[in-house]
Amino acid sequence: MIEIDISKTLHGSSGVMPLRVELNIEDGEFIALTGASGSGKTTLLRILAGLEEAKGVIRVNNEPWLKESYSLPPQKRQIGFVFQDYALFDNMTVLENLLFANNDKALAQHLLEITELLSLASRTPKTLSGGQKQRVSLARAFMRKPKLLLMDEPLSALDPTIRSKLQDEIYKLHKEFQTTTIMVSHDPSEIFKLADRVILLKNGAITNFTSPEKLYLKANSNNLTLQGELLKLTPTDALTIAIVAIGKQIIKVPLSNREAKNFKVGETITLHSNPFSITINRC
């Protein structure tokens, strides 16, 4: 069990914002962390890793990681961290990158096999593709057999085919090592595929902590509700065309010009559909 009850004042482009997070995560859960840019997602990961200060309490299986003035050093937290930018050592081979984290050759061999990197073990990161580099980063994170794996949009820069394959490998490693995993993602399809529960952060506060199905889908036999981002509003003489991103899909939704005045580009919106129409509402 991971118990989190922390607060921190953030200073962003829109001014001062309080980050306030209180939640419990069960051992072995896969948690997706989502929300608009600047809502505090990366800061929360860094606080859990001990890379940023905060007030409050963090306990992992009753072991205090943060309490009052005490903060367990990052190197003692049994954390695995996978970054979007790989953070590999370019002067080391793939195998050396893994062994730098933990000099366990048997474990390194096993992880190279799982992530299909065995044939690349003697290569350096600068000779690898983006997907291969992220595999190395993922394998290196598991070299420490972490209690908690933190991933900050690790797949966002990859093409859909490689991304899907790496999602499978992440889930396989998560299950094999029985690691509790928290991953930042903006992709609903990725969240559906991987997560047990999803945390929605908005302006530094948790506005929802539920299953992916309950957050994104509210369906019965005749109706469906989806969340998406409003990308563009294109007015015509008769109506306005709303361009909406839902996961990796882009759809067009017709609105009356009067309805369109209620929305702003960049908003997260909900689309309600039934057999006869689609309507859009603010979240």
Image: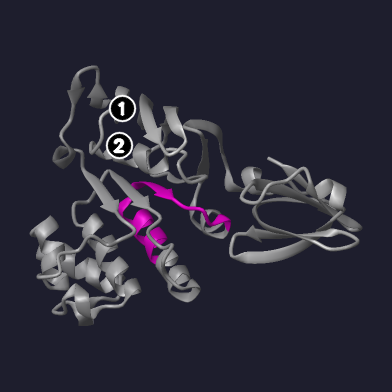
**Could you tell me which quadrant the C terminus lies in?**
top right
Tell me, yes or no, if residue 106 can be seen here: no
Front-most of residues 206 and 165? 206
**Could you tell me which quadrant the N terminus lies in?**
top left
The residue that disc 1 covers is 58
Point out residue 9 in the picture as x, y percentages from the top left corner.
Answer: 37, 26
Sequence-wise, the earlier of marks 2 and 1 is: 2
Q: Are marks 2 and 1 in contact (CB under 8 Å)?
A: yes
Task: Please say if 111 is above or below 2.
Answer: below
Check residue 48 in the rendering and tell me which mark sits there, or answer none: 2
Tell me, yes or no, if residue 157 can be seen here: yes
Q: Residue at x 87, y 59 (%)?
A: 239
Q: Residue at x 16, y 63 (%)?
A: 98
Point out residue 119 in the picture as x, y percentages from the top left corner.
Answer: 21, 82
Task: Please say if 122 is above or below 141.
Answer: below
In the image, residue 190 lies in the stretch drawn in magenta: no
Name the side, left or right, on which 228 lies relative to 68. Answer: right
- What SS does tag 1 mark? strand
Magenta region, residue range: 169-188
Amino acid type shown at disc 2: Leu
In the image, residue 177 lies in the stretch drawn in magenta: yes
Q: Residue at x 13, y 56 (%)?
A: 101
Badge 2, how many Cα within 10 Å: few under 14, some, many 20+?
many
Front-most of residues 24 and 17? 17
Q: Residue at x 17, y 63 (%)?
A: 107
Point out residue 163 in the picture as x, y percentages from the top left corner.
Answer: 44, 69
Amino acid type shown at disc 1: Ile
